[in-house]
Image (cartoon, grey):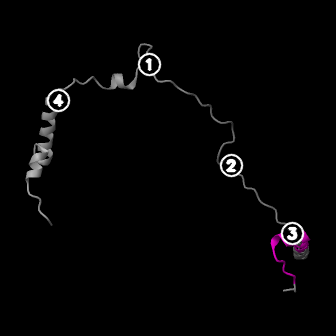
Amino acid sequence: MEDEEVAESWEEAADSGEIDRRLEKKLKITQKESRKSKSPPKVPIVIQDDSLPTGPPPQIRILKRPTSNGVVSSPNSTSRPALPVKSLAQREAEYAEARKRILGSASPEEEQEKPILDR
């Protein structure tokens, strides 16, 4: 490698024009080498993909949902019938039945009365 002067910083080399001189020197060297090689110039090759049609894009239509008797219905009104309102006692009884079926006890107090075994 040649004895080249090394700049203290990029800013200093850019301000003095040293970077530009080195770049032009390297560019001239590569141009000379490419002339000597006698190879055809490198040109980017563009390959077109003919598998897709190049026609106009398809038309997009926005469709409306069908209406019944000219009135648009809300999804909640027709999908589920109204459930009867249950009293607190009915809900507690159903909860106790489900808990007994799943856990084997009807109330949380029965669970706490059993001794907890340490492992």
Residue contact at pointers 4 and 2, CB within 8 angstroms: no
Q: Quadrant of residue 106?
A: top left
- Indicate yes or no whether the magenta region holds residue 14: yes
Give the labeled residue for mark 2: 50
Q: Look at the magenta stretch and give its main secondary structure.
A: helix
Label 3 vs label 2: CA separation? 48 Å
Q: Which residue is mark 1?
A: 72
- Kindly identify the amino acid type of the residue bearing the numbered disc 1: Val
Q: Which amino acid does the dot numbered 4 rest on?
A: Leu
Q: Earlier in the sequence, mark 2 or mark 1?
A: 2
Residue on which the image places disc 4: 88
> Element under label 2?
loop
Residue 55 is situated, as x and y percent measured from the top left of the image, at 69, 38
* Circles 2, 1 touching at the beta carbon (< 8 Å): no
Q: Amino acid at mark 3?
A: Ala
Compare marks 3 and 4 and give the one earlier in the sequence. 3
Of circles 4 and 1, the one toward us is: 4
**CA separation, marks 1 and 3?**
72 Å
Where in the figure is residue 20, as x and y percent of width and height? 89, 70
In the depicted structure, whether residue 97 falls above or below residue 28:
above
Residue at the location (19% across, 26% down)?
86
Number of dots carrying numbers? 4
User: Residue sitting at 24 percent across and 25 percent down?
Assistant: 83
Q: Residue furthest top?
A: 69
Across and down, in percent, residue 91 comes to: 17, 32
Based on the picture, tell me whether residue 21 belongs to the magenta stretch.
yes
Q: Which residues are magenta?
A: 4-24
Tag 4 secondary structure: helix
Q: Split into 4 quadrants, where in the image is the C terminus?
A: bottom left
